[in-house]
Image: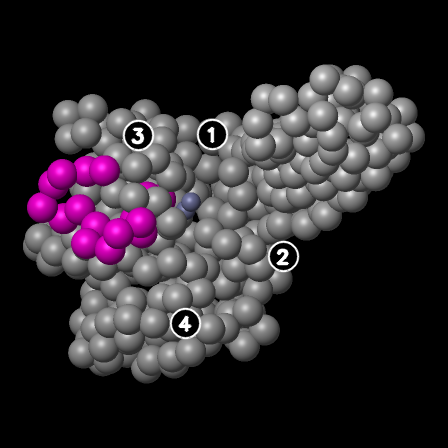
């Protein structure tokens, strides 16, 4: 591999500011589709670095364009900027100041990292060729997400390749991981409404019991993955909430079940949907209830280009040593980075952010979620490394 621009030392001196920005964002989180102040703050910073800034791309998205010294490919790097409806239970000085809203997925770290990258690219134009488009995307956490909207507004126009990372606490700090092909699941959601006939708890023969019908349905739905899906294909059908009834001596008229389906393969996704329809129709007939299914398809599967995944293996091993690079497992969470990868070659990568020593031991979306902040430096080197390797002659 040729030598590419690797601003490792400049990143080290940028680190205190990177932490300061991340903690500012952590204190002031905004929910998906509501990132108005966050995006204005990002745009101000980008302008101060001398980037060409486009605001309100696909909602509160911000895009920054930076031109290098000579012509060459346009490489896009993406960070998501939204937070989650979770009460922050940490007691540290940078805990969220917004009740019920928290950066519990690390998007504050992604944003701070990409801002730092923007500053370094803008300050070192003579070191690299082509152009870089830095994409600050809103609403990753909530379907239909911000990626599709930014693409509709043209954020991928002229882009030759795209890279993105997710800080990842299940991976230890110092490790990075990715893989070619399918990486993250397609997460669909559903709501099932069971309507029966309520009545006296002592006179069930006069009722159609929505609890019994719903309970039977929950059991039957579990047979889709265990009995219908080919076991070599990973899939999940989860009923996460079941709400019915008001008290012990009244038979419930209605039950509402909410859940999620996770798949990596379009045919498996279709099969699950068909089996749900059939099980629901037959359960309704069996109990004399009526049952409605509202099925909402989420993001598509995240699929990395094989050649770009090979680039990741090479770049990451050179930057962090072979012992710091893993082939990622399949991840059952979803990501709307999938939409970019449907349009352009690229790679989505995980950067280890877990570390017991600094309390970064909680899963993503946990109310005490935190990261080893040094993982932002690894993210920045990896993203720049991928871009520079791709842009090299
Ligand atoms: Zn998340
Ligand atoms: Zn996330």
Secondary-structure class at tag 2:
helix
Q: Nearer the viewer, mark 1 or mark 3?
A: 3
Q: Using the image, tell me which numbered label, if any, was put on residue 60.
A: 4
Residue under numbered circle 1: 327
For ligand 1, tell me if the residue under mark 3 lies within 8 Å.
no
Q: Residue at x 50, y 73 (%)?
A: 58
In space, the residues marked 2 and 3 are separated at their CA atoms by 31 Å
Q: Position of residue 178 (x, y in %)?
A: 46, 37
Q: Residue at x 9, y 46 (%)?
A: 93
The main secondary structure of the magenta stretch is loop
Q: Residue at x 21, y 50 (%)?
A: 96
The crowding category of the residue bearing disc 2, from other C-alpha atoms within 10 Å (few below 14, some 14 to 19, many at least 20), is: some
Can residue 68 be seen from the camera position used here?
no
* Figure quadrant of residue 200: top right
Camera-side residue of 249 and 245: 249
Decide: marks 4, 3 in contact (CB < 8 A)? no
Can residue 144 be seen from the camera position used here?
yes
Q: Position of residue 342 (x, y in %)?
A: 63, 57
Is 306 magenta? The answer is no
Left or right, residue 258 beside residue 203: left
Q: Using the image, tell me which numbered label, if any, was put on residue 362.
A: 3
* Figure quadrant of residue 116: bottom left
Of marks 2 and 3, which one's residue comes earlier in the chain?
2
């Amino acid at each position: 591999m040729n030598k590419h621009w690797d601003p490792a030392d400049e990143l080290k001196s940028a680190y205190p500011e990177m932490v300061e920005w991340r903690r500012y964002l952590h204190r002031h989180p905004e929910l998906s589709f509501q990132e108005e102040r966050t995006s204005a703050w990002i745009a101000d910073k980008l302008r101060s670095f001398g980037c060409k800034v486009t605001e309100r791309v696909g909602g509160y998205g911000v895009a920054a364009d930076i031109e290098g010294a000579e012509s060459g490919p346009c490489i896009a790097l993406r960070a998501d900027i939204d937070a989650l409806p979770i009460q922050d239970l940490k007691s540290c000085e940078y805990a969220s100041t917004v009740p019920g809203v928290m950066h519990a997925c690390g998007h504050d770290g992604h944003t701070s990292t990409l801002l730092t990258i923007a500053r370094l690219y803008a300050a070192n134009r003579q070191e690299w060729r082509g152009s870089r488009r830095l994409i600050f995307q809103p609403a990753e956490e909530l379907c239909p997400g911000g990626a599709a909207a930014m693409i509709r507004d043209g954020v991928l126009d002229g882009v030759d390749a795209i890279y993105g990372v997710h800080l990842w606490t299940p991976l230890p700090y110092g490790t990075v991981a990715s893989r070619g092909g399918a990486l993250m699941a397609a997460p669909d959601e559903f709501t099932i409404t069971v309507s029966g006939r309520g009545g006296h708890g002592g006179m069930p023969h006069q009722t159609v019991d929505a609890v019994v019908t719903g309970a039977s349905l929950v059991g039957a739905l579990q047979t889709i993955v265990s009995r219908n899906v080919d076991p070599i294909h990973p899939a999940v059908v989860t009923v996460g909430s079941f709400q019915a009834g008001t008290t012990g001596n009244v038979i419930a008229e209605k039950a509402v079940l909410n859940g999620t389906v996770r798949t990596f393969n379009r045919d498996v996704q279709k099969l699950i949907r068909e089996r749900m329809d059939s099980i629901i129709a037959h359960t309704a007939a069996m109990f004399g209830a009526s049952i409605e299914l509202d099925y909402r398809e989420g993001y598509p599967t995240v699929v990395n280009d094989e050649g770009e995944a090979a680039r990741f293996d090479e770049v990451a091993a050179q930057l962090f040593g072979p012992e710091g690079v893993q082939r990622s497992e399949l991840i059952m969470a979803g990501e709307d980075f999938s939409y970019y990868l449907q349009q352009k070659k690229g790679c989505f990568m995980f950067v280890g952010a877990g570390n017991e020593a600094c309390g970064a031991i909680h899963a993503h979306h946990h109310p005490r979620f935190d990261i080893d902040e040094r993982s932002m430096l690894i993210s920045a080197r990896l993203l720049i490394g991928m871009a520079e390797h791709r842009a090299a002659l």
